[in-house]
Amino acid sequence: MAGLFVRNNFDKKVVNYICSRHLFSSNSVSTSGYEYNYTDSVDQDVQINRNKSGLLLQHRNMLYERPSYKKPSSWIHLSEKYQRKVFSRCGLESGIDPRICFLKKSDLNSQKNYEAVSEPENIFCMMEKSKSKDKQKRDVVLEREEFIIKNMGKLEHWKKDLQNRIKKKEEAALAAKQRKERLVEEVRRHFGFKVDPRDEQFKEVLEQKEREDKKMQKEAKRKAKEQKLLSKLVENT
């Protein structure tokens, strides 16, 4: 009995080896009363060896855009949403009836009622509103462009005005510096010898000179203003 068991195991190994070499054209081999279907097992081994990624079969099928499962394994696989998704990815190869992708009459009526409440305006009104919004945006852009073009025409005038203001400030600063130097020199002549500007007496005399100078400038401005008014009166008469 033990010899027969060993013999049978040996025969199985030999048959499997020969079948794996594809030396037989039939899908099954019968030896010593046993029938072996080697094609499925060999193909399965080949597919397993070719799958170097280690992905599960359902994930590999998704990668190659094939149905993930040949048979439903969950209630989700029987839902319309899932079957529509599979058909959109695999097409007729999925074996799913294409009619499932379309709404039923009851669902279509419900969808129409929902759209009538959520979107009371028809497509033409929506198109008109969209055109009106686009026109408003274009008008804003055109108005902004016209404003920029108008200001660009004034650019040269603004540049000259800025240069004149800078020039006046520089002239005023230079005049103030020269006036200060002149007053310092007058104070030194007042003492008759060179005095340290940090000396208290020097500062007092300098402040007095500055006050006198401001009065003179103010008086000069007043006279210039009076002269200007008189000249205008003469022109009008």
Image (spheres, rainbow, N blue to C red):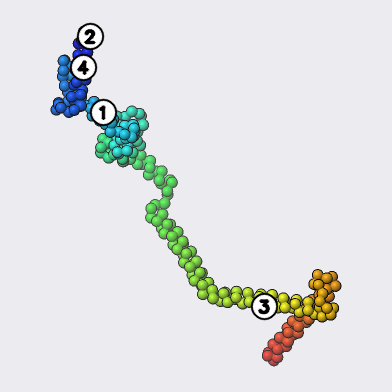
**What residue is drawn where x is 28% and y is 33%?**
50
- Is there CB contact under 8 Å for labels 1 and 3? no
Mark 1 packing: few (<14 Cα in 10 Å), some, or many (20+)? few
- Identify the disc placed on residue 10: 4
Closer to the camera in the image, 66 or 194: 194
Tell me the SS state at disc 4: helix
How dense is the environment of label 4, judged by Cα within 10 Å: few (below 14), some, or many (20 and up)? Answer: few
Image disc number at residue 45: 1
Is 213 or 192 nearer to us in this picture?
A: 192
Front-most of residues 210 and 182:
182
Q: Distance between the residues labelled 4 and 3?
A: 117 Å
Image position of 19 (left or right of 65): left
Q: In which quarter of the image is the C terminus?
A: bottom right
The disc, 1 or 4, on the residue closer to the chain's N-terminal end is: 4
Identity of the residue furthest to the left in this view: 25
Label 2 environment density (alpha carbons within 10 Å; few <14, some 14–19, many ≥20): few
**Distance (Cα) linking label 4 and label 2:** 12 Å
| First of labels 4, 3 by sequence position | 4
What residue appears at the point 20 percent right and 26 percent down from the top-left corner? 20
Quick check: 216 above or below 119? below
- Give the Cα separation between the discs numbered 1 and 3: 98 Å
Residue 147 can be seen, yes or no: yes
Q: Earlier in the sequence, mark 1 or mark 3?
A: 1
